[in-house]
Image (cartoon, rainbow, N blue to C red):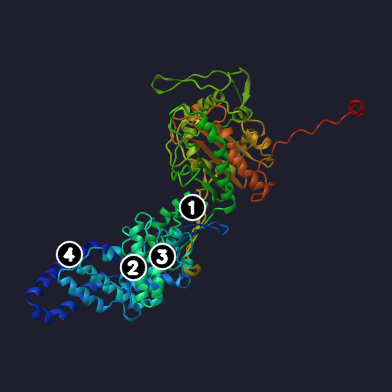
Amino acid sequence: MKNPLTGMIPAIHRVAAVADDLARRALAAMRRHPVRSALALPALLLAYLLVLIPLTPGIADLRKAKSEVPATVLSADGVVLAEYKRMNRQWVALKDISPYVIDALIATEDRRFYRHHGIDFRRIASAFVRTVSGDLQGGSTITQQLARNLYPEEIGRAATLTRKAREAVTALKIESVYSKDEILETYLNTVPFLYNAFGIEMAARTYFDKSAGQLDVLESATLIGMLKGTAAYNPVLNPERALQRRNLVLAQMAGFGKLDPAQVQALAARPLKLDFERQVEQIGPAPHVAMYLRKWLIEWADRRGYNIYSDALVVHTTLNSRLQKAANQAVARQMAQLQPLADARRRRGEERMLLQAGFLALDPRNGQVRAWVGSRDFAQEQFDHVAQARRQPGSTFKPFVYGAAFVHGMSPMDTFIDQPVTIRVDGGAIWSPTDATPPTGDSMTLRDGLAYSKNTITAQVMQQVGPKRVAQLAQSMGIRQSKLDLVPSLALGTSPVTLREMVAAYGTIANGGSYIEPVLVTRVEGRGGQLLEEFQPPAREPGMPHAQALTLVDAMRGVVDQGTGTAIRTRYGIQADVAGKTGTTQDNSDGWFILMHPQLVAGAWVGFNDNRVSMADSWGQGARSALPIVGDVFQQALRARWIDPQVEFAIPRPRPAPPAPQRPQDALGGIINDLFGRLLRQLQ
């Protein structure tokens, strides 16, 4: 939930403008009539502060800020996937901060810190006298600076009396809620230090490559010296100015009794010794999921009055951290294999283009997403190739064509002739799909047409069924966000779709025909594990008749048993009951592969962001570009027993025929041949 004052900021600024004008007039009057103005000053000041009190953060807001904890995203097995921090900051307890830091801070910024209650009237009086005389001075305490850090929009940054008054009022409120040590701890953990480093811990890591508790007196003085102006006293860009400021802080520490004056001269002579490195926020194991859920959680929290940055929300997801790790590794390995091949195709002078990939795995029994990889490297590519990218699915769309055929009475054993096909489309154009090899003129069953991904057979099936029926089936099975063009070429996957839609639709096939909306979040908890909302499993929706869904599963087994996906068996040694489909678009612009098991459906896409750029024939086909990612993940999932290798689909699996029994004479002949072979080897 946003701060209640946030919506009032325009009104606050209008009131502030009026108050500033009155303050300027009051100062001018004081110069003209100092005695008379001095008598009226207390009443004016009191009235002024009373006006500002409602326009500053309330006690409840301050208590909430005191216990601010960002939302956390957890995997189903309890691994932290992301934290939604307001800024790049790691909170550190006051006891774990170097005492030199605290001494330098108080000596330089607020020597009377432990003797005032948020406002140092002695400093204010001194600053006021100087301001009246034309020398603008500040008298902010550490507590006032904390008020400005916590509520920058409400208090503002302008050098005006109204801003100082809002600071002062908020500081008084802070002192009523926070102890002095809590104020110091909060201040040191919220102050900015450039380079996206917020708080003393990130500053210590950024400038000196150590924790806040390990800072020595010189390092502490350097960082506290930056607080006067982080840009002006930046030790990286302005080392001489930062050195002078550091030495001034050392002198202040000596004057405050926190440093031996005899040491100051020797310490001041020592150079700045930085070990600078920008601190990059840690990217979790599922960054695209974290990005996707951040948007969702903000909307969820706003509707219910929560704040994702402070209310300690815990989002429980369906992801399996081990499967996610395996998917990340599989994508990285395949990209490392293919990128050099892509680079070798570059022409001289052409800019290098990175090959991209997407991967999604879900449980078809309940729609729960188990792994999600949106790109090869989130740090370089935040665009999500699972939920955002729409690409032509190529032959991975063909199961919808054959599924529609089965629904409308055809059998996997029905045959078509593998021959040239010419189809006239609207407008008089001719569509003539071809395959990598010329037509044979032989009969081919629908089962084999799907297994070997024959375009000529698929086009004839589409003629029989019609694009409208195919599109309706695909939509009911899971292609629900992307538009499908009702043209014959839809059979070969010419309408762009997302990987998320395709994997969800294959999940419909795998579970026997029920569409289940992919789900990522199971529940959201608050502080102390309080259940805020639990999400019911998504309802099953009719996607495809059960019997025909099982028929389609059985036909798609042929893809991995003898068709275009046999590498699943031969290269990855997967003997579990699986079925799937490869896909390659025209000119190898997109490579796809989706594999189904009763407990897991996983799909991968590989290609360039620019779909005009193609991959090579030798490695760009889905069986060579995308299949290895899925095969790698499935291999690990089966070996680790994340899924049961013994579970099978609810339709009998074709078994190889047992070998014919040998006749006695054949057995005797085999023995003689074996002995003869051994004798020859010994003679050699």
**Mark 1: few, some, or many residues within 10 Å (few <14, many ≥20)?**
some
**Image quarter hosting the N terminus:** bottom left
Q: Amino acid at mark 2?
A: Leu
Mark earlier in primary sequence (2, 4): 4
Mark earlier in primary sequence (3, 4): 4
Q: Amino acid at mark 4?
A: Ala
Q: Report, in whole angstroms, how far the alpha carbon at label 1 lies from the one at label 3.
A: 20 Å
Q: Report, in whole angstroms, how far the alpha carbon at label 1 lies from the one at label 4.
A: 43 Å
Q: Are marks 1 and 4 in contact (CB under 8 Å)?
A: no
**Mark 3: few, some, or many residues within 10 Å (few <14, many ≥20)?**
some
What kind of element bears circle 3?
A: loop
Q: Nearer the viewer, mark 2 or mark 4?
A: 2
Is 608 situated left or right of 35 in this image? right
- The vertical placement of 284 against 100, above or below, is above
Q: Which mark is residue 283?
A: 1
What kind of element bears circle 1?
A: loop
**Mark 4: few, some, or many residues within 10 Å (few <14, many ≥20)?**
some
Q: Amino acid at mark 1?
A: Ile
Residue at the image point whose x is 52% and y is 36% from the top: 606
Residue at the image point whose x is 41% and y is 60% from the top: 272
Report x, y in % for residue 16: 19, 66
Report x, y in % for residue 593: 56, 37
Towards the viewer: 639 or 232: 232
Q: Which residue is mark 4?
A: 17
Q: Which residue is mark 3?
A: 310
Q: Which residue is mark 2?
A: 248
Report x, y in % for residue 500: 49, 43
Q: Is residue 633 visible?
A: yes
